[in-house]
Each structure stands twice: as structure tokens, then as C-alpha cells.
Image (spheres, rainbow, N blue to C red):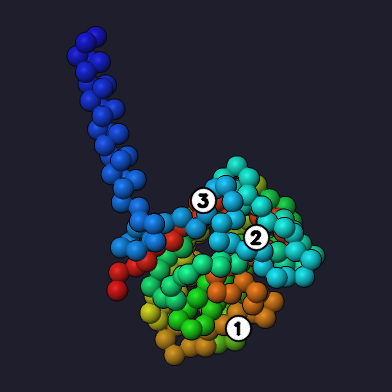
């Protein structure tokens, strides 16, 4: 029994050291390729309510952000500093109620902005709004996913020079060349700029929201 106990303690010590290493590599500002939180799990922090018409009021509960359905759009906008290029954002999103987009992630692209839409146009359409004036339902980034309410979906967005990329459940759904193209957002989500999360007549739950600065 004694040697087994020694081995168990050794494994626990190694695991503890590895965990400590993982914790110490996370930067507070997301620089140097390290993921940093955009949500502390308990409060809105630097997120503010987006100025939509009659929105559901967002709140934090159980380390999750809840965006209730509004009359049209509901959402939150980041009030802190954020880069314009060379970054990634990741999060987990769930459609908790309703049948339209539950993750409208608006983000900066140099001096412009775009939105990654998940579950729009009746509940299935994904893509980038807008490229050359065409929204997520009408450009080359358009895909369709049969989202189910109550299921968590992992999302990752990458913004680099001349390219927008996105992954859903670790499967790439966007790989768009943006060189010499017009990039913008639909007028309905302008209140999400520069960085925001919105829903359309739908309740969403969001968690594990973080970002990192990519190497030049």
C-alpha cells in the first residue's frame, strides 16, 4: 500500500504543478497569445446594455450571462479597450428560448466592423454580415446549422489582416478573404459596435467568453 500511496501523491503533485503553470500563463490583457476573460462570471463588468428598442435586460447568473429576448434585439456592448485587428475571441453560447439568432457577435475589423451571426433567418443561418454589402444570408460565408435549444455550442472567431475565420464546435464555418472588400454591419446592430453580443427575439446564455492578441 505504501508504494501506491507514494505514486498517488507524486501524481497529485505533478498535476498541481501543471495546473499552476496553466494559471500563470494567462495574461490579464490577452497579449502574447494568452487567453484573457471578457466575463468574470459574476457581473457585467465592462459590458453595458446595448441601446436597442425595448430589449431584454442582460444579467449574470451561475457564471453565465443571460440575454433575455426583447421586442426585437437584445444585447450587450463592450465599453473597455479592444484591438482592431490580430485577435481571437472564443465563447460558448446556448439558445435558451426562441427560434432566431442567439449569438450575434459584432467585432472590429481595422476601422470598420462586422458581425458573426449564428442561427439567424428563422434559426439556422450562420455567416458574416456584411461583406460587400451582402449579409450573412447572402454571401459566400453562408452556412446552415440545425441548432437545438438547450445545447451549448463552442464558438471561436479570428480576425487577421485580409481574413476572417470562425469555428463552430471546432469545425471551421468561415474562411473569408477580406482584402479590398467593403466590410460593415447591418444597421439594426450598429448599437453593438465596437464589440457586442446580440440576439433577435431570442433568449441566449453565454459563458467562458475570452480573447487573445495574436502575434504580428
**Mark 3 vs mark 2, CA separation in Å:** 21 Å
* In the depicted structure, whether residue 172 falls above or below residue 136: above
- Callouts 3 and 2 close, C-beta under 8 Å: no
Please identify, in this view, whether the residue under mark 3 or under mark 2 is nearer the observer.
Answer: 3
Which of disc 1 and disc 3 is earlier in sequence? 3
- The residue located at (64%, 77%) in the rendering is 190
**Mark 1 vs mark 2, CA separation in Å:** 20 Å
- The residue located at (41%, 76%) in the rendering is 85
Q: Nearer the viewer, residue 141 or 48?
A: 48
**Mark 3 vs mark 1, CA separation in Å:** 35 Å
Q: Mark 2 points at which residue?
A: 102
Which of disc 2 and disc 3 is earlier in sequence? 3
Q: In this view, does 114 lie to the left or right of 85?
A: right
Number of numbered markers: 3
- Where is residue 1, by image quadrant? top left
Badge 3 marks a residue whose secondary structure is loop
Q: In this view, does 39 lie to the left or right of 187?
A: left
Name the spot of residue 6 as percent of width and height, x first.
21, 18
Which of disc 2 and disc 1 is earlier in sequence? 2
Q: Name the residue under label 3.
A: 40
For residue 134, the mark is: 1
Observer able to see residue 198? yes
Q: In this view, does 126 lie to the left or right of 166?
A: right
Quadrant of image for the C terminus: bottom left
- The residue located at (51%, 50%) in the rendering is 40
Name the spot of residue 206 as percent of width and height, x first.
59, 53
Amino acid at each position: 500500500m505504501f508504494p501506491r500511496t507514494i505514486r498517488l501523491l507524486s501524481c497529485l503533485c505533478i498535476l498541481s504543478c501543471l495546473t499552476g503553470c496553466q494559471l500563470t500563463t494567462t495574461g490579464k490583457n490577452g497579449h502574447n497569445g494568452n487567453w484573457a476573460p471578457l466575463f468574470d462570471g459574476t457581473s457585467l463588468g465592462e459590458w453595458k446594455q446595448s441601446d436597442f428598442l425595448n430589449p431584454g435586460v442582460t444579467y449574470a447568473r451561475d457564471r453565465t450571462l443571460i440575454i433575455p429576448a426583447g421586442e426585437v434585439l437584445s444585447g450587450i456592448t463592450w465599453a473597455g479597450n479592444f484591438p482592431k485587428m490580430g485577435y481571437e475571441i472564443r465563447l460558448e453560447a446556448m439558445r435558451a428560448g426562441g427560434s432566431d439568432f442567439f449569438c450575434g457577435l459584432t467585432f472590429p475589423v481595422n476601422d470598420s466592423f462586422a458581425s458573426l451571426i449564428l442561427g439567424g433567418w428563422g434559426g439556422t443561418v450562420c455567416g458574416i454580415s456584411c461583406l460587400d454589402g451582402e449579409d450573412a444570408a447572402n454571401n459566400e460565408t453562408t452556412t446552415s446549422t440545425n441548432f437545438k435549444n438547450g445545447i451549448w455550442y463552442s464558438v471561436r472567431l479570428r480576425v487577421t489582416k485580409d481574413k476572417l475565420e470562425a469555428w463552430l464546435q471546432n469545425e471551421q464555418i468561415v474562411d473569408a478573404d477580406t482584402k479590398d472588400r467593403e466590410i460593415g454591419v447591418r444597421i439594426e446592430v450598429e448599437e453593438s459596435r465596437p464589440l457586442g453580443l446580440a440576439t433577435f427575439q431570442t433568449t441566449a446564455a453565454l459563458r467562458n467568453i475570452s480573447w487573445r492578441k495574436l502575434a504580428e
